[in-house]
Every structure is written in C-alpha cells, then in structure tokens.
Amino acid sequence: MRKLDQNDKNADQKPSLSILGVYSFSADKAAYARFIRELIDSHDPPNFSEEVKDILRNGGRGDEIVPLTPEERQDWEGELRFYMDDAAVLEVLVKNPDPRFNPHDFAQIDPSNPKDHSEMAWNEMFLTADGETEIETDYKQRLPAAVSRGIRHPSLGA
C-alpha cells in the first residue's frame, strides 16, 4: 500500500461523514482464528526479531527466549477473544474535515461505566477516498480534504 503525506484541503466545502461499512472480526471464523493465531505467534519469543532477541540476551534475559507453553497460548487467546469477539471495524468516509473532527469522538457509551470510561476508537488508519493508499498522520496534523477512515471499535452492537 502506497503512503502519502497530509496535504490537500478544500476550505470551500462543508465537512461530511458517511458510514461505508461495519465489519465484525468474528464473522469469518477461519480468518478470525488465523488472525488470533498469528497475533499470538508474533508474541512468542522465538519469533521475535533478531534485534529484539539480541536486546534480551544483552540485558541478561536470553533465558526468556523460549516458546510459549500451551497454557500461555491459551491465556493469550482468551484475553484476545475477550476484547475482540464483539469488536467491530467501522469504515467511515470523512470529507473536508475541519478542526472539530476528532477520531476519538467515535465512542460507545456504557451508562454503567464512569463518564470517562467509554469504548473508543483504536488503531486508526487514514486512507485516501478510494481506500487504496494510506495517509501517514500524527496527532498534530490536520486530515486531508477527503479520506476513508477504518476504525476498530470494541464491543459495538451485539
């Protein structure tokens, strides 16, 4: 996927937001199981990069580079499924965002939780309107005039 810097702003057009899709991680059971397995594999010390392994060895922690036990893998899976079984990905088209747009305003309020403990967007990604190119951003930059926005949001609906 090609990456672009932020630029491009059409000040004469009003901001708009459209929901393009809402997707469940668990809708495709096989793909979801593969995703969970691959994520656990990425946290298994023998699969760490050589650079990380060298850091562990040089820090006197080389003895930690051992495979996860079946119980540890099961714990990882349980933890991931706890948070992700009911999660959703929202794909949103934002056109001409202005300073009021804040990705963290996408929140699910649970009245049983304190006001500042709502579920909110995480692992956001900004794409061009055609969805083909990632736009690199940081928290200080404005969004370009039109972007498609994928948001992973825990516990949406259900």
Image: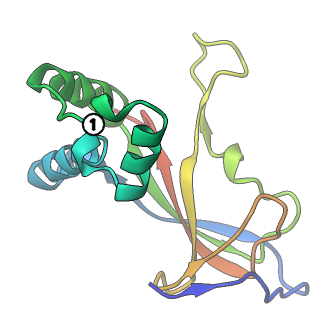
Tell me the amino acid under the disc marked 1: Ile
Q: Quadrant of the C terminus?
A: top left
In the image, residue 95 sits, relative to residue 115, either above or below, namely: below
Q: Quadrant of residue 141?
A: bottom right
Q: Choose between 46 and 123: the one closer to the eye.
A: 46
Q: For the residue labelled by badge 1, is the local secondary structure a helix, a strand or a loop?
A: loop
Residue drawn 30% across the image and 49% down it: 24
In the image, residue 98 sits, relative to residue 32, either above or below, namely: below
Graded by Cα atoms within 10 Å as few (under 14), some (14 to 19) or many (20 or more), the crowding at tag 1 reads: some
Instruction: Find residue 73 and report its horizontal and vertical position in percent.
Output: 18, 29
Q: Choose between 32 and 49: the one closer to the eye.
A: 49
Q: Choose between 16 and 88: the one closer to the eye.
A: 88
Residue drawn 72% across the image and 18% down it: 115
Left or right placement of residue 36 versus residue 140 in this view: left
The residue that disc 1 covers is 65
Instruction: Find residue 70 and report its horizontal and vertical position in percent.
Output: 9, 25
Q: Quadrant of residue 138?
A: bottom right
In the image, residue 9 sits, relative to residue 106, either above or below, namely: below
Q: How many marks?
A: 1
